[in-house]
Amino acid sequence: MIEGLLLIGVLVAMFVGYNIGGSTTGPAFGPAVGAGTISKTVAAALMSVFFFIGAWTIGRRVVDTLGRELVTNPDIFTLPASITVLFFIGLALFVGNVFGVPASTSMTAVGAIAGLGLASNALDWAVMGEIVSWWLVAPVIGFWLSAVIGRYFYAALNKRVALVQTEGPLLTIDRSGLLPVITFGPGTTKREMVGTTIVVSIGCIMAFSSGTSNVANAIAPLVGSGALEMNTGIVIACVAVGIGAFTIARRTLDTLGNDITALPLTAAIVVATVSAILVISLSAIGIPASFVVIATMSIIGLGWGRATRTMRASRESISDQAGDARVTVGSLAADTEGEELPDIGEEDPEDIPAAADLFNPSTTARVILMQNVVPLISTVGAYLVFRFVPVFGF
């Protein structure tokens, strides 16, 4: 009986890991894929490797934290309860992935465990309050930090970085000799190579940070209950994450890389940098980081800040445009990298594509809605089951 339940628990944990791979690959490598610097396959491979490194090194500490500190009585993590918690985490994440929205695994996992804690009167409200507070503050910081960069610094960065992407492969491999020789591809410049390395490296850092916090979402209940040994659980979770990165993550890579706004490489670097800094900062103070929401709001904030540069400073100009409902939110792809952009208020809106060409309002609304609905599904579902199903006895 116990072995059968454990097998079910492992399968459910792998299902959760599969959906974590699908939902976190987009925020980490969506900007790089959207800018055309790497393929979805390469993004999945990098996600798998760096997620494992983060999980194996720092992730085991987060597994212990999530399995003990969020509830006042860790004994509630019985094997059946752990399986049920994992089921709701996986189900909620799967719903988000089906809609192509990279939902927050941390919010979803904490929500399911909170549902268990509420039903058993074992939720530590102080810990929960601290986590939720940072979840509310961090996306706002990401949005406004990116918006400020987009409005006041993006033009200067765009001119100085000048990361023009050339046609053809970034690198070529000569296999005619005894050892393969890697050289720059036709037309590849040093500045392009540096920029590509930066944006991909930041994605790798985000994948690493995802491993440090999100591996706990897949195995913490099972490890906390003693059903799984730590190292075994980490390997199982990472294999499942890799499968998810190579399969269902293609949808979230499209959402974060293409659907929200067309990102040139300069913008991709800004978004990845802001998101990575916030995620690492939250991880450093022990908060399970919701970098899915942070990255999404950073993309939107940068586009909004860039678009507001077209607003005229004079009252007369503002009056002249009062009847024009077009707002060029997401005006990033309108720029040619390396060009010198006009000062704030001096850009001609006619030279910038319409909002519909650069920013998909329906996609953005779907992303924000689902990123709140998915954790709600796991929280409410877990609470109702643990509260009203007699078998758990809470």
Image (cartoon, helix red, strand yellow):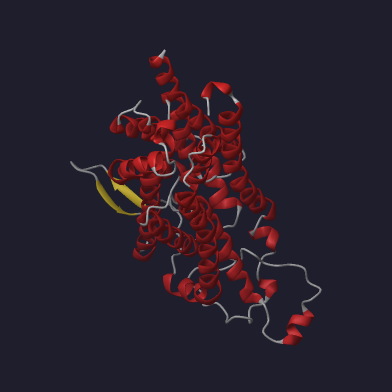
Q: Position of residue 131 (x, y in %)?
A: 47, 52
| Residue 143 seen | yes
Q: Nearer the viewer, residue 119 or 101?
A: 119
Q: Position of residue 116 (x, y in %)?
A: 51, 35
Residue 312 lies in what quarter of the image? bottom right
Query: In which quarter of the view is residue 263 placed?
Result: bottom right
Depth check, front residue: 322 or 166: 322
The vertical placement of 114 against 148, above or below, is above
Q: Residue furthest left?
A: 178
Decide if residue 100 is in sight here: no
Q: Residue at x 42, y 62 (%)?
A: 273
The residue lying furthest to the right in this view is 323
Does residue 48 appear to the left or right of 354 in the view shown? Answer: left
Query: Which residue is at the front of the view, 305 or 349?
Result: 305
Which quadrant would the N terminus be assigned to in this image?
A: top left
Residue 363 lies, with reference to residue 80, above or below; the image says below
Residue 217, percent from left and from top: 44, 39
- The front one of 97 and 5 is 5
Q: Position of residue 103 (x, y in %)?
A: 55, 45
**Image position of 116 (left or right of 201):** right
In the rendered image, which quarter is residue 242 located in? top left
Q: Is residue 65 above or below residue 151?
A: above
